[in-house]
Image (spheres, helix red, strand yellow):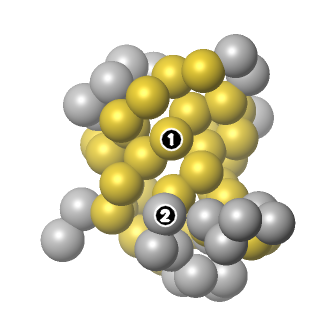
Amino acid sequence: MEIGEEFEVDIFDVAPNGEGVAKIKNFPVFIKGAKLHEHVKVRITALVAGAADAELVQ
């Protein structure tokens, strides 16, 4: 997984801060603005220790 790469994911949980949570290859990805049970297209914006941040792609 690289910054700028895009994926389609299913949101299976919501983090305490309200970000939607998905997994890509068992790697948690946090997506601001995503809601539980949505199927969304995301773009990776940051890679951090053991997780990634992503934004919604319209």
Q: Looking at the image, is 31 positioned above or below residue 3?
A: below
Q: Residues within 10 Å of mark 2 (few under 14, many from 20)?
A: some
Q: Residue at x 70, y 41 (%)?
A: 28
What's under tag 1, amino acid-wise?
Answer: Asp
> Splitting the image into 4 quarters, where does residue 16 fall?
bottom right
Image coordinates for residue 23, horizontal then vertical, percent: 67, 47
Count of labels in the image: 2
Query: Quadrant location of the C terminus?
Result: bottom left
**Helix, strand or loop status at disc 2:** loop
Q: Which residue of the protein is positioned furthest toward the front in this rendering?
A: 17
Q: Residue at x 37, y 19 (%)?
A: 2
> Splitting the image into 4 quarters, where does residue 36 fall?
bottom right
Q: Is residue 50 left or right of residue 5?
A: right
Say whether marks 2 and 1 touch (CB < 8 Å). yes
Q: Is residue 48 visible?
A: yes
Q: Residue at x 49, y 63 (%)?
A: 32
Looking at marks 2 and 1 on the same chain, the residue that comes earlier in the sequence is marked by: 2
Q: Residues within 10 Å of mark 1 (few under 14, many from 20)?
A: some
Task: Point out which mark residue 6 bears.
Answer: none
**Helix, strand or loop status at disc 1:** strand
> Splitting the image into 4 quarters, where does residue 41 fall?
bottom left
Image coordinates for residue 33, horizontal then vertical, percent: 46, 74
Q: Looking at the image, is 45 positioned above or below residue 16?
A: above
What's under tag 2, amino acid-wise?
Answer: Lys
Image coordinates for residue 13, horizontal then vertical, percent: 77, 69
| Residue bearing mark 2 | 32
Q: Nearer the viewer, residue 14 or 10?
A: 14
Q: Is residue 12 visible?
A: no
Q: Residue at x 24, y 62 (%)?
A: 57
| Residue bearing mark 1 | 53
Q: CA distance from mark 2 to mark 1?
A: 8 Å
